[in-house]
Image (cartoon, helix red, strand yellow):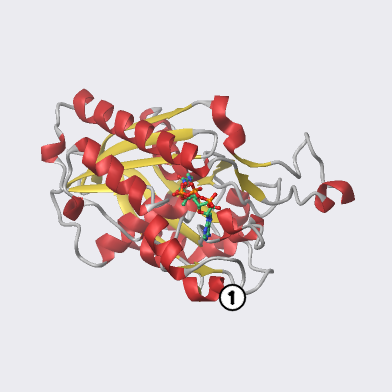
């Protein structure tokens, strides 16, 4: 029977590695603080400011299409979740479609910060159910280091760059997307925000002098609390809705923002830490790409096996959050 699901998945990160010891030379921090408070040891970052988000996406997208064993001509939509697009417009999806040489397709960016991959799966599933689309390239990618203030130790130790891509389609051998839920609430959006460059604070010298072109996180501990609460809540909701319990879950694939957040969610869901996909030590928080990077890394390492039940969950700026159940 044909199922809607993932046909292929892949990730890509830039080659340059920035370690915690490198950061010790840049801001007032220590490897011990970063490791203990976040679980991060190193992260991949772009080595050249000319590298754009679409450049990092390209190898991931090519590999995902190859693994899905479809012709790129059969892709009829490219959806990209990113808060660091190549340009305001045209969309990064337009850049990626052009660079991949895909025929005409629906090309669209959307913004859901760290929940980008889950939102993308949700939109893709809806488009396929409409009957008008067959194979959708869902990309979640961010180069947060482009909008990082390297003098701000509260944020600069947290982020890395990366891209994840998956082809979603309807086929007998698809990794079934059993269900996906997306949600959000803008009332605390100010806690994680990039103030400059948009219509509220357009790009002016004054805006740059105030350093509003960089992302800011106010009250990290508050974001931390909401992340645990909402990821737990929406994970329980999707399990219940589909008549599963957390005992049925083989792998929890959470957004990789902080090891302590992941431990908090796993504990509240009653999922042992051995069943949690953890890649934060090597990549840091890669925003939208964190969930697909974690998923495809464990898949490439042979840890995720056929038939296993995966529970994906993410939380990010907006605030946004989501969950998905996949039968691998
Ligand atoms: O991906 C989207 C969602 N984002 C998140 O989910 C991030 C959520 N928040 C977090 O992960 C954590 O709140 C952080 C990792 C950002 C911070 O950890 P924390 O345990 O909440 O620390 P804190 O903000 O309460 O700060 C504790 C102390 C402060 O010093 P004082 O005021 O106690 O003297 C900070 O100034 O740690 C200090 N601090 C640092 N020290 C060394 C903050 N950043 C650093 C640093 N190195 N890089």
Q: Position of residue 21 (x, y in %)?
A: 49, 75
In the orientation shown, which residue stands out farthest toward the right?
205
Residue 304 occupies which quadrant of the picture?
A: bottom left
The structure residue drawn at horizontal position 54% and vertical position 65%, both measured from the top left corner, is 29
Q: Is residue 251 visible?
A: yes
**Horizontal relation, residue 192 to residue 126: left or right:** right
How busy is the neighbourhood of tag 1: few (under 14 within 10 Å), some, or many (20 plus)?
few
Query: Quick one: 54 or 21, which is closer to the camera?
Result: 21
Name the residue tied to disc 1.
25
The structure residue drawn at horizontal position 75% and vertical position 40%, both measured from the top left corner, is 198
Q: Is residue 167 above or below residue 232?
A: below
Q: Is residue 130 above or below residue 88?
A: above
Q: Is residue 78 visible?
A: no
**Horizontal relation, residue 71 to residue 48: left or right:** left
Q: Is residue 132 above or below residue 28?
A: above
**Horizontal relation, residue 208 to residue 272: left or right:** right
The structure residue drawn at horizontal position 32% and vertical position 59%, both measured from the top left corner, is 296
Query: Quick one: 180 or 146, which is closer to the camera?
Result: 146
Cβ of mark 1 under 8 Å from ligand 1: the answer is no
Q: Quadrant of the N terminus?
A: top left
Identify the secondary structure beneath mark 1.
loop
The structure residue drawn at horizontal position 88% and vertical position 51%, both measured from the top left corner, is 205
Q: Position of residue 101 (x, y in %)?
A: 55, 60
């Amino acid at each position: 029977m044909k199922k809607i699901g993932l046909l292929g998945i892949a990730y890509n990160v830039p080659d340059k590695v920035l370690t915690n010891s490198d950061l010790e030379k840049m801001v007032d921090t220590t490897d011990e603080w970063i490791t203990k408070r976040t679980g991060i040891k190193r992260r991949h970052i772009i080595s050249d400011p000319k590298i754009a988000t679409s450049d990092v996406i390209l190898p991931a997208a090519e590999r995902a299409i190859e693994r899905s064993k479809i012709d790129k001509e059969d892709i009829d939509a490219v959806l990209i979740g990113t808060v660091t697009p190549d340009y305001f417009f045209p969309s990064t999806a337009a850049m990626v479609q052009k660079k991949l040489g895909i025929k005409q397709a629906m090309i669209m960016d959307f913004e859901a910060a760290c929940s980008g991959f889950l939102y993308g799966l949700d939109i893709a599933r809806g488009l396929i159910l409409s009957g008008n689309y067959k194979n959708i390239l869902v990309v979640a990618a961010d180069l947060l280091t482009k909008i990082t203030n390297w003098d701000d130790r509260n944020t600069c130790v947290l982020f890395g760059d990366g891209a994840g891509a998956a082809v979603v389609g309807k086929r007998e051998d698809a990794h079934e997307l059993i269900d996906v839920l997306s949600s959000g609430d803008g009332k605390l959006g100010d806690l994680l925000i990039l103030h400059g460059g948009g219509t509220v604070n357009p790009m002016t010298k004054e805006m740059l002098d105030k350093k509003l072109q960089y992302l800011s996180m106010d009250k990290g501990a508050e974001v931390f609390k909401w992340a645990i609460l909402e990821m737990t809540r929406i994970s329980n909701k999707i399990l219940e809705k589909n008549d599963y319990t957390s005992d049925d879950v083989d792998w929890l694939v959470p957004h990789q923002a902080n090891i302590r957040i992941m431990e908090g969610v796993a504990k509240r869901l009653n999922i042992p830490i051995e069943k949690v996909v953890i890649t934060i030590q090597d990549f840091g928080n890669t925003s939208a790409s964190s969930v697909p990077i974690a998923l495809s890394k464990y898949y490439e390492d042979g840890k995720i096996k056929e038939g296993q039940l995966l529970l994906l969950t993410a939380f990010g700026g907006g605030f946004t959050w989501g969950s998905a159940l996949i039968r691998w």
